């Protein structure tokens, strides 16, 4: 497989990731024979009543090697619902009373079919629930060798 960044524009894809169930973080493996320019990751965390500070981190590995780890710009306490987003080039802004927060993804983050995009949450409890998970990317299909 060629390791170059494609020169033409790819198609925009939006992937909905299956909800993992209560108390479990989520992960998504890129499909085979694709190359992605990652644009956005967004998901909702509903926390249970257990007292703990939840700190989500978006983690991307490529061939088993960690490429990037981005800590969300806000932790979450018990009995709350919060929409987390990691968007290309955006800045995190602290606004009191918000129920969502965007954290920056680096521009030009290209991934191949060995990549795994996941959220790892410090302090996640068995009653916490990740839902509404989607990933947006520009995609190219790799030719058969």
Image (cartoon, grey):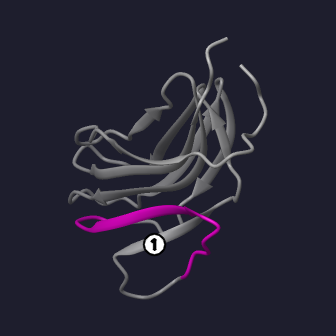
* Relative horizontal placement of residue 6, taking residue 133 as reference (left or right): right
On screen, 10 above or below 81?
above
x and y percentages locating residue 94 in the rendered image: 52, 83
Which residue is located at x 72 percent, y 40 percent? 6
Q: Is residue 123 visible?
A: no
Farthest residue in the top direction? 145
Quadrant in the picture for residue 2: top right
* Relative horizontal placement of residue 24, taking residue 48 as reference (left or right): right
x and y percentages locating residue 73 in the rendered image: 54, 68
Numbered disc total: 1
Secondary structure type for disc 1: strand
Which residue is located at x 62 percent, y 21 percent? 143
Quadrant in the picture for residue 64: top right
Report crowding for label 1: few under 14, some 14 to 19, many 20 or more residues within 10 A (C-alpha). Answer: some
On screen, 87 above or below 117?
below
Q: Is residue 2 visible?
A: yes
User: Which quadrant of the rendered structure holds the N terminus?
Assistant: top right
Q: As rendered, which of 68 and 48 lies closer to the eye?
A: 68
Q: As rendered, which of 139 and 115 lies closer to the eye?
A: 139
Which residue is located at x 26 percent, y 68 percent? 80
Q: Is residue 91 magenta?
A: yes
* Relative horizontal placement of residue 106, taking residue 103 as reference (left or right): right
Farthest residue in the right direction? 4
Which residue is located at x 59 percent, y 45 percent? 10
**Image: magenta residue range:** 78-93
According to the picture, the residue beneath numbered tag 1 turns out to be 101
Q: Is residue 29 magenta?
A: no
x and y percentages locating residue 98 in the rendered image: 37, 82
């Amino acid at each position: 497989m060629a390791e170059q960044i494609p020169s033409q524009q790819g198609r925009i894809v939006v992937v909905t990731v299956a909800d993992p169930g209560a108390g479990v973080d989520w992960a998504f493996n890129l499909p085979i024979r694709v190359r992605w320019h990652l644009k956005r990751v967004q998901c909702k965390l509903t926390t249970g009543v257990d007292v703990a500070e939840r700190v989500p981190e978006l983690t991307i590995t490529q061939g088993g090697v960690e490429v990037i780890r981005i800590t969300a710009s806000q932790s979450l306490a018990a009995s709350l619902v919060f929409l987390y987003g990691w968007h290309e080039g955006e800045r995190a802004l602290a606004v009191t009373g918000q129920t969502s927060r965007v954290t920056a993804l680096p521009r030009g983050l290209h991934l191949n079919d060995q990549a795994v995009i996941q959220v790892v949450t410090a302090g996640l409890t068995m009653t916490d629930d990740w839902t509404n998970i989607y990933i947006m990317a520009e995609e190219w299909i790799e030719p058969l060798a």
